[in-house]
Amino acid sequence: IGPGVPAPGGPHDLDDLLHPPPALVHQPGRVREYKIFAMDKEIEIAQGVTFPAWTYNGTVPGPVIRATEGDLLRVRFTNGSMHPHTIHFHGIHPANMDGVFEIVDPGGTFVYNFPATPYGMHMYHCHATPLKKHIAKGLYGALIIDPPQPRPTAREFVMVMNGFDTDGDGENNFYTVNGRAFYYARYPIQIKRGELVRIYLANLTEFDLINSFHLHGEFFRYYPTGSGDQYEYTDTVMLCQGQRGIIEIEFHYPGRFMFHAHQSEFAELGWMGFFEVTNS
Amino acid sequence: IGPGVPAPGGPHDLDDLLHPPPALVHQPGRVREYKIFAMDKEIEIAQGVTFPAWTYNGTVPGPVIRATEGDLLRVRFTNGSMHPHTIHFHGIHPANMDGVFEIVDPGGTFVYNFPATPYGMHMYHCHATPLKKHIAKGLYGALIIDPPQPRPTAREFVMVMNGFDTDGDGENNFYTVNGRAFYYARYPIQIKRGELVRIYLANLTEFDLINSFHLHGEFFRYYPTGSGDQYEYTDTVMLCQGQRGIIEIEFHYPGRFMFHAHQSEFAELGWMGFFEVTNS
Amino acid sequence: IGPGVPAPGGPHDLDDLLHPPPALVHQPGRVREYKIFAMDKEIEIAQGVTFPAWTYNGTVPGPVIRATEGDLLRVRFTNGSMHPHTIHFHGIHPANMDGVFEIVDPGGTFVYNFPATPYGMHMYHCHATPLKKHIAKGLYGALIIDPPQPRPTAREFVMVMNGFDTDGDGENNFYTVNGRAFYYARYPIQIKRGELVRIYLANLTEFDLINSFHLHGEFFRYYPTGSGDQYEYTDTVMLCQGQRGIIEIEFHYPGRFMFHAHQSEFAELGWMGFFEVTNS
Ligand SMILES: [Cu+2]
Ligand SMILES: [Cu+2]
Ligand SMILES: [Cu+2]
Ligand SMILES: [Cu+2]
Ligand SMILES: [Cu+2]
Ligand SMILES: [Cu+2]
Ligand code: NA
Ligand code: NA
Ligand code: NA
Ligand code: NA
Ligand code: NA
Ligand code: NA
Ligand SMILES: [Zn+2]
Ligand SMILES: [Zn+2]
Ligand SMILES: [Zn+2]
Ligand SMILES: [Zn+2]
Ligand SMILES: [Zn+2]
Ligand SMILES: [Zn+2]
Ligand SMILES: [Zn+2]
Ligand SMILES: [Zn+2]
Ligand SMILES: [Zn+2]
């Protein structure tokens, strides 16, 4: 934990991926606009390890997209990479906004335009073929749709679980949340004891059939897909690719609490971090 | 999608596997009789690809068995294959109807006879040893038990997820629902917008630890095992072998909506199809 | 089933692992003390097959630890092995009781001391690195925390699912519950028809991404993590490493009912047993 951990980058590099935009109360007729630009980019995924990624807006995962149920979501997609791509959103939308048949060639543009629904934690990813490659290369991100009356105020985080196959053998060599191995072990996430913590969690790991989130020393409520009121009170949840949910925690104790995949291999290859809980 | 898709067979070949028999209201003393005949058979699982299957009634999966809770289920099993087999049903039944100790030799017959319970989505499969081989060869099918007062009327489908290891190396080379790769991409399933769609889903995939069902552009209610009132509202569910459940959808939009495993490899090796939703 | 099954040991060898200590009603200020001693030990995991285990108290899994919510749990850990170890408990506790930073060297001692909470089924395991090895070698066990007013009286069992990699290639060669392949097929678990059966189930299997529990001929209620009132009524549940839950069954019929992983390979490599249900 701390400066000794071999994780890439500075303390604020992932701020935009960890901290979602704020939730907005429903307001009829509002449009939420996002611009997504596909670009091929070499990124540093572990200390001294680069990966020739295909990215949305230059990072893996791509930017966090957020809207309130009923907003019109307008995502202007430009393909600045050398391969055909799309954006496929999870959630409810018309067939011609699905990002499956409307392949966007290099240099092309497509505007995805649909009412955001249903509320919950979702995701987006490229759906060009071969699907396995377009996902493994890094074309995915988090999509949050808030209820019309947003959830109670909380310290909110986004965590996209993924893997990187750096030698092309169809197995992941590194596992991360938000794209950098051991990043939150080098830069623990700061929490105040007793405050409500909300994590928007998604699994986009390719190759491995499941991934998981385990929290040390504390329990949380897990709302699968973030789409209802039922939750499991636990410290370990498992997701296959495409699954996601919302975690809510209130820490009872101060101190450093690890979180990681409960697959030892994934944890040891980078999917591990810390919450640092201080008395407020 | 459509005629260009390399899927085997004609448009109605899988009708008996996709469309379950109708649900019946509870009626005291009713007997539901089925005949199952085990036979070795070469089947076409992908365009131009055959598999030396062990089958119930000549197909993989075998026939859909359906009864109402409280019906007496009577399944007359005859082993017309060259290997010993059984039928093991999921659900509640006496120990001597369990299809574990009562191995049926080639040429032999056994009558499974027990009250159908509890209501839910179930399955049946051979339980002869080696278990891995008898399942991988194709000896399984769907068992639906309806509540005494059947569920609301819906357009009902059965989807059994499976895999085929065509080269005997212990890994699946093709993945399907109802036994044929890409079949529902060549022949999309016809739906009317707004109508209630109900899918009886089961996972009998051997070798891979999980399989999953993902729907594009729409959400559904998932009732695990179909045995209760609690559901998850989502677009992606994961099942290990032996797990099953009931999906209920009402499509908001017309058009073509893909469904597939959210394991890219499974989707690209055949476990992919379309709903074609039309305005009624 | 019975004496012909090649399982190691005598009929009462696993009594302490199968039968948890009794639940106690909440009593303010009570201390629950356990002593755990890490020791390297060759254990017999399948008939004629030994495994060079790292153990808590000489068995894999280690002893069952049980307390009531609100008890002060005091676990005196002494490392009698040749490697550094810890005990990490799932549940809620102070950061300095988490068994991550407080590595206990050979010959050393550490006393874990914290209020037992929340009620549910939990687990403990070593958290020394490499994590994969310390778990695969056998350093884990069940932790049960009872509600202040204990659950209804039942015939209670503990089942810890695990695997053993006997040739060191990173894949399990045997799978068991409570450490011995086919043990409960040789010595079926005795049940009375109609009585309430409660199983505290946990998955500590290393290497494989999931494990599962399937029951023949009967249904059960599954309470994930044992931490709430919601359950699934089913016969098959899937868990990744670190997940656990509580199963409640009342058998309708007498006779022998198999239970096993619904991964054929795991079942055939030892994770298989029987309940023997008699009319009371
Ligand atoms: Cu893609
Ligand atoms: Cu933990
Ligand atoms: Cu079988
Ligand atoms: Cu989708
Ligand atoms: Cu450990
Ligand atoms: Cu069964
Ligand atoms: Na690799
Ligand atoms: Na791997
Ligand atoms: Na194969
Ligand atoms: Na495969
Ligand atoms: Na091995
Ligand atoms: Na294995
Ligand atoms: Zn792409
Ligand atoms: Zn841990
Ligand atoms: Zn997806
Ligand atoms: Zn068979
Ligand atoms: Zn898709
Ligand atoms: Zn089964
Ligand atoms: Zn250790
Ligand atoms: Zn079985
Ligand atoms: Zn753990």
Image: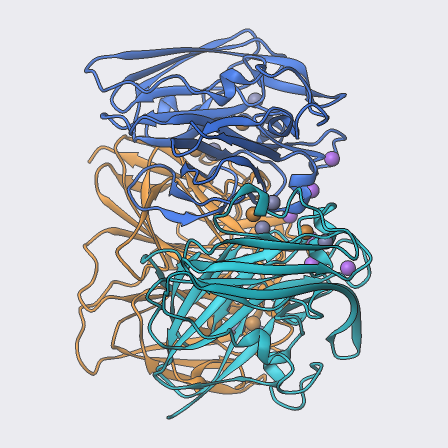
Chain colours: A orange, B cyan, C blue
Residue displayed at 26% across by 77% down? A71
Q: Is residue A59 visible?
A: no
Residue displayed at 35% across by 46% down? C231
Image location of residue A227, percent across then percent down:
31, 62
Image location of residue B197, percent across then percent down:
41, 76
**The image quadrant in which ligand 12 is located:** top right
Quadrant containing the N terminus of chain C in the rendered view: top right
- Between residue A209 and residue C82, name the one nearer to us: A209
Image location of residue C29, percent across then percent down:
21, 13
- Between residue A9 and residue C53, name the one nearer to us: C53
Q: Does residue C32 sit above or below A233 in this rendering?
A: above
Q: Does residue B35 sit above or below B127 in this rendering?
A: below
Residue displayed at 37% across by 61% down? B28
Q: Does residue C88 sit above or below A251 in this rendering?
A: above
Q: Residue furthest top?
A: C107
- Between residue A208 and residue A42, name the one nearer to us: A208
B238 left or right of C154 in image:
right
B250 left or right of C172 in image:
left
Q: Toward which corner of the image does residue C59 lie, by quadrant?
A: top right
